[in-house]
Each structure stands twice: as structure tokens, then as C-alpha cells.
Image (cartoon, rainbow, N blue to C red):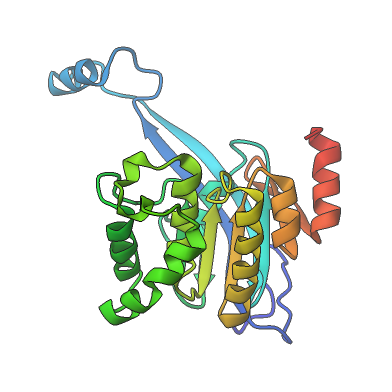
Amino acid sequence: MADTKVRNEVEIDPAREPIVVVDDLHIVYRVFGAGGKGNAASAFSRVLRRQNRPTMTEIHAIKGLSFVAYRGEAVGIIGTNGSGKSTLLKAIAGLLPPHSGGVYTDGQPSLLGVNAALMKDLTGERNIVLGCLAMGMSPTETKAKYHEVVNFAGLKEGFIQYPMRTYSSGMGARLRFAIAAAKTHDVLLIDEALATGDAKFKKKSKRRIDELRKEAGAVFLVAHQLDTVKEMCDRVLWIDDGKMRMDGPPEEVISAYTEATGK
């Protein structure tokens, strides 16, 4: 990160420590079988017979995005459905390869989505243990953090021993975030995982996000609830059709987005 700017003329502040650099990023999905008829079994049968081979459609999801995020920032990402928000987070997490351009991170990104992998047939207790171990925590660290996670999630007495399939969407969302927040992350990427939390939990989440920013790297938050973004972030990116529409303070960006979209 020695250069002072990236290809799309995004300046890097030499007085601050960059933790994520997105450099003229393009993400292209290739979707096979788009527009085909029938169910999956009939489509598979046609492929085996070499008949009506599936077509391929390219979707240009991210179109030349460039920006720099600095250590200690909480960055909100807003935009209408299909604008590329979740795709961007997956690219930063290293789950989607760039078609061109690049993503550079100082440290390991961790993606927390609304469908984060918790095992619905296992109890909340077992999911906490597995989740902490999967994040690289030792068994000793996991044991030390267990009650903190339970308390943060605010689960009712006894529910921690129930299978996850018995949890409401709000309970599941709280537990997912509580597990992710048990560890300090270099870059924490939150994709709609706070959407089903209540007001009390969102206040706790904001405090924890502030702590994570101070303890380590940066936090990225995708949320449709603009008040959540405004409360939790000190910078907002507005993405429209895979392109950067605006990048600035939450009040300014959200005001412009609301005026343009009527949301």
C-alpha cells in the first residue's frame, strides 16, 4: 500500500492507516441455465443427453468500484436491492474473485450474514462452541467467552439448550451477532445480520461495534434500515447499479439517497 492513490483516482491519506483498498473492482457473475424451462431433474436429463445445453448469462454486478477504508472506521453500505452491496462484501471477504481490479486487506476479513452458518439441529450452546472454534479461538478462549455470548444474545432462560430450529428469526440474528462479536476481527463485514434485532439489541450492537473499531480494524455494515446505518457508522457508501454514487458522512449520503429514491 505504498502508492498514494489507486487507479480510479481515489486518494489514500498518508496520515491514516488503510485497512481495505478496493481498486477499480469489477465482479462478473456467470449464470448457467438462465431462462431454461422445467425443473432441475429435467434440465439435468437434457444435459446428460447433450440436448439443449444450458445457456450462460453474464451479470456485471460491480462496475469499477474504488475506495479506501481506514483502521477504526465503521462504513455503512446502502443502495436498492440488486445494487451490489452483498456482492461487494463477499469480494472484500475473498469469497468472489475479481473479474478485473483488486481488493487488498490488511488482515483477515470475516463475513457475518443473515444466513450465517449455524446448525439448526444443534442447540444454541453447541453452535456457540462451534462458531467460536471456527473463528480460530482455542477451547479455553471459547469456554471463557461462552457466558458473555449468551448474555449478549439475550436469550431467554433455557433456550440456549434448545435446537436452533426452535428459535425465532430475531433470536437467531442475536445469537449470530453475539458469536461473531466474541472475537476481535481485523475487518468485520455485517450483511443484514442486524435486520431482525430489536431496539435494545441494536443499542448493544452499536456499543460492541464501537469497541471492535477501537480494538482492531474496520467494520462494514449493509442494512436496509437507514436509521441503523446512521447510528452505527461514521461513513456511508451509496452503491447504485454496481457503481459508486456517493461516499461521505452518514447524514449527507443518507439524505441524498432518501431524496433520490423516496425511501
Whole-percent x, y for residue 20 in the image:
58, 70
Q: Residue furthest bottom?
A: 15
**Do we see residue 61 in this rendering?**
yes
Whole-percent x, y for residue 217 in the image:
57, 76
Depth check, front residue: 213 or 10: 213
Q: Is residue 70 left or right of residue 115?
A: right
Question: Where on the picture, by quarter, is residue 206?
Answer: bottom right
**Residue drawn at (69%, 62%), measured in percent from left and top?**
8
Depth check, front residue: 86 or 205: 205
Whole-percent x, y for residue 156 in the image:
45, 52
Depth check, front residue: 100 or 215: 215
Q: Is residue 248 left or right of residue 176?
A: right
**Residue drawn at (50%, 57%), measured in percent from left and top?**
154
Determine whether 29 is above or below 178 in the image.
above
**Do we see residue 7 in this rendering?**
no
Q: Residue furthest top?
A: 38
Depth check, front residue: 21 or 121: 121
Determine whether 211 is above or below 84 in the image.
below
Image quarter of the C terminus? top right
Determine whether 14 is above or below 259 in the image.
below
Q: Residue furthest front?
A: 157
Determine whether 166 is above or below 17 in the image.
above
Q: In this view, does 75 lie to the left or right of 152?
A: right
Image quarter of the N terminus? bottom right
**Residue drawn at (51%, 78%), measured in percent from left and top?**
106
Whole-percent x, y for residue 42 in the image:
21, 15
Q: Which residue lies furthest to the left in this view?
A: 49
